[in-house]
Amino acid sequence: MDRRNFMQKSGAVSLTGLAFLSSINKSFASSFEKQLNRLENMSPESGASDDDFWNWIRESFTVSPNLINLNNGGVSPQPKVVQDAHIRYYQYSNEAPSYYMWRILDAGREALRSKLADLAGVSPEEIAINRNATEGLNTIIFGLNLKAGDEVVLSTFDYPNMKNAWLQREKRDGIKLNWITIPQPLEDDNAIVDLYRKAITPKTKIVHITHLINWTGNIVPVKLIADMAHSKGCEVIVDAAHSFGHIDFKIEDTGADYFATSLHKWLCAPFGSGLMYIKKDKIKNVWALLSAVEPDGGDIKKFENLGTRSFASEMAIGAAVDFHNVIGAKRKEDRLRYLKNYWVDKTKDLPKVQLFTSLKHNYSCALTCMGFEGWKAQELDAYLYEKHKVHVVSIVHEKVNGVRITPNVYTSTKDLDVLVKGLTNFSKQTPPQK
């Protein structure tokens, strides 16, 4: 394939997801299409539990057969087709870096921007491509025009990097932070909205909301909170690091004025990829974090002045978007929730078990936090790895003391049977004397 055809096939937004994937691996795309055709006549419930299809999806990844990775909430592996795209772009760049990166691949960012905007349901003029949710949200937090005495409402269950950014602004600029604590699990929309409402004062300018809490997996009723905050004249920042590509929604469904996510989590894009959204009429209100010709201008691209970046990694995001779209956002969400329910239903009544995640449909999906009374989270974490080679992550935050268990689309029910066996055996042990 000559370079011109390579770029046309890799970057043209008019091509369907399968056609794009076919340009990387024809055999894979053809097989993918056959698998999807078989699902078309199935109900959503049957599709979510169809092991033939999801085992085929598993084979699309290159995950280790010697470890059961159930910490996909931290960072997800990429399907092989995304890895292949990344490698091809990387090799292409190395033929003449300053030419192929800056004159060819850099031009592909606009096609990618449109593809991401379509996935998010917003205008391309409102999307900046960056490296992760922390970068996007810190850009917003540090770029907003806030002065001493202005107030911000946020939660003790927000992500540490965002809390620390706000604490820096408090220390540096004299703004006031009003903290709320959200019960874990949460299952009452009105009670949650009330917590935010009571923290808002006439001086409140910003309400910062985490859509899906990274510690526990509980889904916050973000749109209801945003509507309430807007009615009181506040702007809303939404941290969607764990919800985007995980549950089926568009940015407008959150009510966000400002929004950011990491694409290397649930979208399974290359490591170190993310996006930031700012409403078109609010871009001028956020200063560029890095140097820009018009740091207070209205062009979203002012936030992309990163200098030399990984163009190969950035361009391969397109393959991840197409892989996600071909599966289907709703089908993916249904499968992830099915996997969560599969193992939780078998373990939720074990002796001394503690669940910090709601099991109700609207309040959780794949990510769950579980512990056992009398045991430290680290002890359960170590046991699952040492005895069953199951990798999870310890969560100790406020009253939460458990392990975060996070399957992904490549996770099999057989993997989860090993998890269930490990949790069951662990529950039969006597807690150590503290």
Image: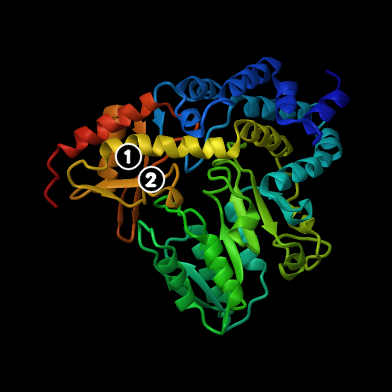
Where is residue 126? Give x, y as percent.
74, 56
Could you say where residue 84 lies in the image, as x and y percent from the top left? 66, 24
Real-space Cα distance between discs 2 and 1? 9 Å
Residue under pointer 2:
368
Instruction: Look at the picture and state if 198 lies above or below 35.
Output: below
Secondary element at image label 1: helix
Residue 319 at what x, y percent from top left? Answer: 68, 32
Report helix, strand or loop for mark 2. Answer: strand
- 322 w.r.t. 124: above or below: above
Residue at the (18%, 50%) spot, across then down:
374
Marking on residue 152: none
Q: Residue at x 44, y 72 (%)?
A: 194
Q: Quadrant of the N terminus?
A: top right
Q: Amino acid at mark 1?
A: Val
Q: Is residue 183 left or right of residue 425?
A: right
Q: Are marks 2 and 1 in contact (CB under 8 Å)?
A: yes
Q: Quick check: 234 above or below 408?
A: below
Q: Nearer the viewer, residue 42 or 31?
A: 42
